[in-house]
Image (cartoon, coloured by chain):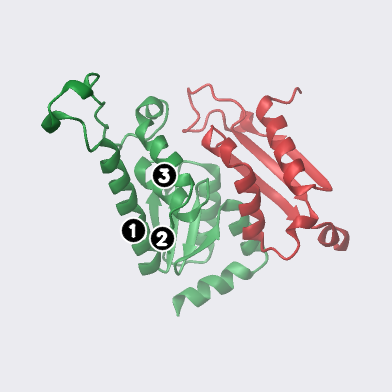
Amino acid sequence: MLRSTFKHAQSIRNIATLNAVTNAKRCFSVTQVPRASVDADQSHDDFKPKSKVDNVTDRFEKMKEFIDQQVNKEPVVLFMKGIPSRPECGFSRNVVNILESYKINYKTFDMNADQLMKEALKDYSDWPTIPQLYVKGEFQGGSDIVSKLHFDGKLKQILNDAKK
Amino acid sequence: MMNGARYIAIQKKLTDALQPTVLNLYDDSHLHAHHSAMRGTGAVETHFRLEIVSDQFEGKSLLQRHRAVNSILSDEFSQGLHALQITKAKTQTELDKT
């Protein structure tokens, strides 16, 4: 279910300009993208900065493939900020608390530890925020929807079905 | 409390696109000013909470309703809107039943 959306270009720009924002955020795992040389036009072909965007695009697409594999391999996957024992956002904590109440196993990925994955995930799900819950490859929603599914009793059914 | 530029923009975009019969928008940014992603950025108008009632939600799942709202606000998300809680997304008929 890989998709290429119009948001892709925006996501790429987000990644390419990360250096400007990461200092203010808790996202330190991003590889620094080399800046293009000022006199790029005058340099020899061999030395032209050729792969900056390609590299980012490539890594971005590979990351989406990785996400696709993970959500289809693992029954329950939560993309959150922080880790279950130490969520770094109230909305992530809320979903962790709900999942914990069902005493199930679930896999988590820390989006505060991987900015590329965070941007790739937003594009993959076409969903702008974290946390995001997947059950059997299917996107369930963020904190509000998971809460509603939980209180309506539907989440129990969804999670039970995932065990089969 | 004065409403900020993003508050007004969100309100207008949702009103234009969904013609809601109820639209309650709350700027909760102050509650999150110290959480990790916001700390030290001086960012304002980052966290909002929304209750919306629109007949355009008719026949749509909750996920589709959230997607519709997110899509209307996609520019806001790419320009610094960090979180939007949607605590209610109903049709007028659903609201009248409750």
Image vertical order of residue B50 relative to residue A161, above or below:
above
- Asked if labels 3 and 1 touch by Cβ distance under 8 angstroms, the answer is no
Residue A83: x percent and y percent?
Answer: 40, 48
Helix, strand or loop for disc 1: helix
Kindly identify which numbered label has been placed on residue A119: 3
- Asked if labels 2 and 1 touch by Cβ distance under 8 angstroms, the answer is yes
**Chain A palette colour:** green
Question: On what subunit does the disc labeled 3 rest?
Answer: A
Amino acid type indicated by mark 1:
Glu
Q: Do labels 3 and 2 share a chain?
A: yes
Answer whether residue A7 is visible to the viewer in this image. yes
Residue A91: x percent and y percent?
Answer: 55, 46
Helix, strand or loop for disc 3: helix
Left or right, residue B82 beside residue B8:
left
CA gap, disc 1 to disc 3?
13 Å
In the picture of the structure, the residue carrying the numbered disc 2 is A2
Chain that is red in the image: B
Work out whether mark 1 precedes mark 2 in sequence or the reverse, and give the earlier one: 2
Q: Which quarter of the image is occupied by the C terminus of chain A?
A: bottom left
- Answer with the quarter of the image where residue A20 lies: top left
Answer whether residue A84 is visible to the viewer in this image. no
